[in-house]
């Protein structure tokens, strides 16, 4: 449990009691890890990709089928005023002129089972 606040300021260590400490059990915490795209341990960019895999930002997977050639990068182009320093950028270097119904391009986040347990 994280300490949310101490309700009596400047108290001695031995005087801290449950009544004086407010706990936040964080039951509704955000379960998206690396949603700010700040961690990219594999690489900060990948070029010439035509199939999906984990390329750049940790936990985020690019998935594609017959959608041309792409480059992915951890970018500093971000929405202003939202508190983010990084984003995941997709650049199409060779477009598929006529995508078929089953062709796809998307990114996904896969969760570990332990991260879903409250």
Image: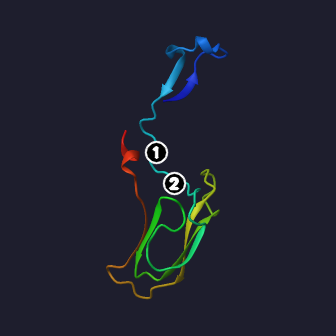
Q: Is residue 9 positioned above or below 58 on the image?
A: above
Of all residues, the one furthest to the bottom in this rendering is 97
Of all residues, the one furthest to the left in this rendering is 101
Q: Secondary structure at mark 1?
A: loop
Give the residue at x 52% y 59%.
Answer: 58
Q: Which mark is residue 30?
A: 1
Q: Which mark is residue 116?
A: none
Marks 1 and 2, Cα distance to the nearest angstrom? Answer: 9 Å
Q: Along the horizontal axis of the image, is 99 left or right of 15?
A: left
Give the residue at x 40% y 87%.
Answer: 98
Mark 1 Cα shell of 10 Å, populated few (<14), some (14-19), many (≥20): few
Can you give x and y, in whole percent of width and height, for residue 93 in the image?
55, 82
Q: Along the horizontal axis of the image, is 95 left or right of 45?
A: left
Q: Is residue 69 positioned above or below 107 on the image?
A: below
Mark 2 Cα shell of 10 Å, populated few (<14), some (14-19), many (≥20): some
Q: Is residue 85 positioned above or below 117 on the image?
A: below
Of all residues, the one furthest to the top in this rendering is 15
Counting the numbered discs, the total is 2
Can you give x and y, in whole percent of width and height, for residue 73 in the image?
58, 69
């Amino acid at each position: 449990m994280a300490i949310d606040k101490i309700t009596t300021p400047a108290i001695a260590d031995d005087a801290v009691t449950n009544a004086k400490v407010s706990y936040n059990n964080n039951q509704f915490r955000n379960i998206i890890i690396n949603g700010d795209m700040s961690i990219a341990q594999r690489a900060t960019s990948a070029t010439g990709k035509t199939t999906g895999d984990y390329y750049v930002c940790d936990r985020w997977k690019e998935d594609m089928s017959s959608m041309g050639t792409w480059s992915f990068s951890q970018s500093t182009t971000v929405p202003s005023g939202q508190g983010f320093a990084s984003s995941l950028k997709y650049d199409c270097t060779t477009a598929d002129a006529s995508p078929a119904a089953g062709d796809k391009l998307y990114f996904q986040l896969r969760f570990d089972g332990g991260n879903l347990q409250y």
